Amino acid sequence: MEYKYLRIQGKELAPNTMYAKGVFSMCMQMLENNVMEQEDADLFLEINDWFANVLPWPPQCRRQEPVVCFFKTENSQEMMKMINPVLWLLEKYNHPYYLVYTNFPGEIVYEDQYQVCCRTDGKLYIEPLQKSWSPEEEE
Amino acid sequence: MLGTDMQREGKALTVALSGRLDSSTAPDLEKQLDLTDTEKLVFDLAGLEYISSAGLRILLASMKAMDKQGEMTVRHVQPAVMELFTVTGFSEILTIEPEEE
């Protein structure tokens, strides 16, 4: 199976999207919380600056609308190379992250060569607990 | 302790590093590193034993500068440093010259 989109996200939810925070937002939060040593923080900022120069900043993100971004897997090989040191930093600080590959990113409201930006409704859906579907244990 | 030897030939600059490139030595290197009018930058890491995030940041910042004005390569990377390059993904970001047989 080939997937068109990839998002790197953490466990923490962003209040405006009710969606797991993306990798840059996650790292920025770590900087604000003084989790990283200064040299690691500086390395992240250097990498972040590279992305700021190469990756367009969607206007919806700039306005903090309830949107999330996914990399396009077919065009973002260079991005993925540069994201690896960021993942290394997350590993170094035992900060969990998840690589979400999908063909269903949601309603696309912005698109460029490297990424799409998709609308979220800013709500968190919690479904009721399902009846267990595991085989019944025999006494 | 970091040893630096910078050799300039025209628009080519070779920076040979030895010892440890970490948060205590990186600021001095950054001050010394003048990339003005440099079109070819080579980091010779034959004597470099250790590199930390501060050193990685200098390599990345240099690469970003050279992407605009020329090229940058890294050579003679020792196993301990190469291991860090591999773990961090810098081995795929930097242009590392293959070792001669």
Image: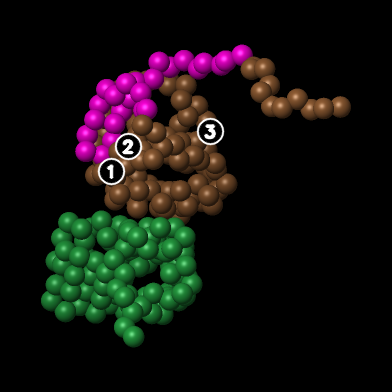
Q: Chain of mark 2?
A: A
**In terms of depth relative to the viewer, which is nearer, B18 or A117?**
A117
Q: 10 Å neighbourhood of mark 3: few (<14), some, or many (≥20)?
A: some
Q: CA–CA distance between discs 2 and 1?
A: 7 Å
Residue at label 3?
A11
- Amino acid, disc 1: Glu
Residues drawn in magenta? A104-128
- Amino acid, disc 3: Lys
Chain A: colour as depicted: brown
Which residue is located at x 36 percent, y 28 percent?
A: A105
For mark 3, give the secondary structure: strand
Residue at label 1?
A74
Q: Chain of mark 1?
A: A
Measured as percent of width and height from the top left, residue A41 is found at 44, 48
Residue at label 2?
A4
Tell me whether circle 3 and circle 2 mark residues in contact (CB < 8 Å): no
Q: Earlier in the sequence, mark 3 or mark 2?
A: 2
Tell me whether circle 2 and circle 1 mark residues in contact (CB < 8 Å): yes
Q: Chain of mark 3?
A: A
For mark 2, give the secondary structure: loop
Relative side of A136 to B16, left or right: right
Whether A130 is drawn above or below B8: the answer is above
Which residue is located at x 57 percent, y 46 percent?
A: A94
Nearer to us of marks 3 and 2 is 2
Measured as percent of width and height from the top left, residue B23 is found at 46, 61
Which residue is located at x 27 percent, y 22 percent?
A: A109
Q: Earlier in the sequence, mark 3 or mark 1?
A: 3
Q: Is residue A50 visible?
A: yes
Chain B: colour as depicted: green
Which residue is located at x 47 percent, y 29 percent?
A: A20
